Structure formats: structure tokens, C-alpha cells
Amino acid sequence: MGDTSHGTIYGINGPVIKVRGNHPFQMLEMVMVGHDRLVGEVIRILKNETIVQVYENTTGLKTGEPVVSTGKPLTVKLGPGIIGNVFDGIERPLVKIAEDTGIYIKRGSVMNNLDTEKLWDVKMLVKPGDYLNQGEIFAEVKETESVNHKIMIPPGIKGEVIEAAEDGPYNIEKTIVKVRDEKKIHNLTLIQEWPVREPRPYYRRLPLDIPLITGQRVIDTLFPLAKGGTAAIPGGFGTGKTLTQHQLAKWADADIIVYVGCGERGNEITEVLEDFPKLIDPRNARPLMERTVLIGNTSNMPVAAREASIYTGITLAEYYRDMGYDVAIMADSTSR
């Protein structure tokens, strides 16, 4: 659909805006709002208007500004470079943004989710003539010393390999495999895109019969958790909910940790960002950040982006789950 379809803002109420115009918007479609091209999402379509939720600060937005269609839902990029990174709720790299624009994210900041220039040493696992189904692994990348990133066939694609690159250094946008199905040829790179609100497919659910050792004896003894299960930590202000999650992130026996700070105070997220790079993984004496992803959406960021940050974190976690890793995802906190 591209940038040809657009409407016009005629109402603004905090992060929620009303749009009018001859526009073919779709539910949950990502749109660019205003002259600053703020990221938004269509949450309701009525006969004469469309309701859009904006994931950035709408201060200064005016009626009459355009809302441009992108033709696709809110998506994230999945590939090497996720581990060890710090993202906001819509997978913008905060460290890279801080280097370019300062400590505060400028409205409408546009930046590649993952580094497109870095070269990764790719080990190919397929050759021309092989037949691949969705989810099968066709290459491997040493993402960190602790994580071997497995490059998988995206869901919905299967067919015969007609071309495969040699082992060597490639960036994430370089085509390394071509797969032909009955209809067309698919060019596969090191990355794939996935809508954050759509669960990634799975073949079958496994029984919850393996315990998750949290490293906290009181939890493991009185409130044991299972791998694949869920748990909640209720409590009042200052009772240790966030600290408990920090301890689980540090010591749980999961392979990958995805920590989502959605709505917590900035100083608590700052503590996480300062502490985690200093922690040593007891498994291999390497930095814990080599198997950790941090997503930060503090209480001074737009409310709409807090919800998106949870979906983003789950999507990243499901991606590494598909590789066969045990992934622990923590959201702090859903009540905010």
C-alpha cells in the first residue's frame, strides 16, 4: 500500500487521535502520524472516522496534519543483534539512539532496529537441492559467546533450496538462501519480520513437567515454577516485586532472559541497565548480558507504548523459543 493512503487529524486526546478522510486503513495497522511521522496503530474503525493510538508523545501535534498508511501491522525485526541490546517498546535501539540524539528519544526517531552494517560469521547448514519446511534451521551465527543464533525458515515458507551462499561474513540484509515453492522464489536473509500482536506458530504444546529453578530457595520450595508456565508477583508499593524479578533474571536456569520494564520508575530501570552489564553468568563466567534482552518503557513514556512493549518482549521470546532455547520473560509491571 505504501505511503499513498492517508487521512487527516481532526481530534486529539492525549495519545488517542481521531482521523478523517478517504483512507483504507485496516485494524491494527501501523500508521505514521503528523509531520514528525510518529508511530501509531489503528485501534478502531468507524463509518466516518478512524481511531489511532500513538506510541510517542503527542505534544505539539495539531489538527489538519496527515496520518499516512504503511500497509502493515506493527512489526519487529528478528535476527542476530537482539541479544545484549536495549530496546524501547517498539524495538528501537536505545543505546544507538542515545549515541545519535542524546539521552531522550526525539519524537519520530527513525532508526534500524538491528545493525545493518555489522558482519556476522555465518555457518551454512543447507545446500542446493535440500527441501526445507517452515521453522527448519538453514544457518547458524555465533551471536554472543553464550548464544548460538539459529537462522530459521520463516513461518509460511517451504520449498527446495535452489541457491545457498558459502560460509562467511554477511550482514543481516544479504540474501544467503533462495527457496522455490510452487508459486515463487523466496530470498532469505538473516532476519525476518513478525507482527507483535500475532503469536508465533508452534507444532504442539509440551507438558509442564520440568521445573524452572529460580535460584531463590523460598520460591523453589514453596512456590515451584514450571518451564512453560506463568507466575505473578502481587504486592503493594515497596514490597520487593521488582527486586524479586531482578533476582530471577540473574539466577533462573533459563537460556535466554527477556526483561521488559513497562511503566516502572526511571530509577528502577536505570538500576537494571547499570547492574546487568556488570553481572557474571555463573554458567560460563561470561557477562550475563550475553544472553539477555532488555526492553525499557518507563513511567514517563507514553502509556500506549507500555502495552506494546509487552507484545514486543513476547515476540522476541517466542523467536528464541523456536530455536529450542528455554526463555524466561519478565514484565515489570503489568499493573502500570
Image (cartoon, rainbow, N blue to C red):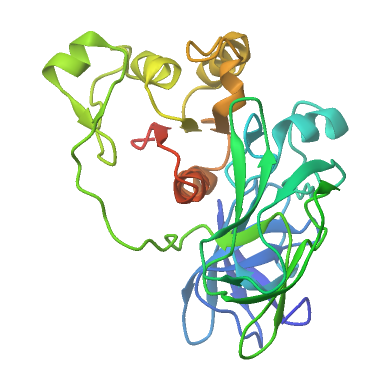
Q: State the quadrant of the C terminus.
A: top left
Question: In the displayed image of the protein, which residue is found farthest to the left?
Answer: 222
Tell me which corner region of the image, top left, top right, bottom left or bottom right, holds residue 100.
Answer: top right
x and y, in percent, of residue 136 in the image: 53, 61
Query: Residue 118 versus residue 336: which sits nearer the camera?
Result: 118
On screen, residue 312 above or below 261? below
Count of numbered circles on the image = 0
x and y, in percent, of residue 310 in the image: 45, 44
Residue placed at 40% from the left, 15% from the top?
A: 251
Query: Residue 255 versus residue 1: which sits nearer the camera?
Result: 255
x and y, in percent, of residue 42 in the image: 54, 68
On screen, residue 21 above or below 219? below
On screen, residue 245 above or below 177? above
Query: Residue 172 versus residue 158: which sits nearer the camera?
Result: 158
Tell me which corner region of the image, top left, top right, bottom left or bottom right, holds residue 291.
Answer: top right
Q: State the quadrant of the N terminus.
A: bottom right
x and y, in percent, of residue 168 in the image: 84, 46
On screen, residue 6 above or below 296? below
Tell me which corner region of the image, top left, top right, bottom left or bottom right, holds residue 17.
Answer: bottom right
Residue placed at 61% from the left, 42% from the top?
A: 149
Residue placed at 38% from the left, 32% from the top?
A: 333
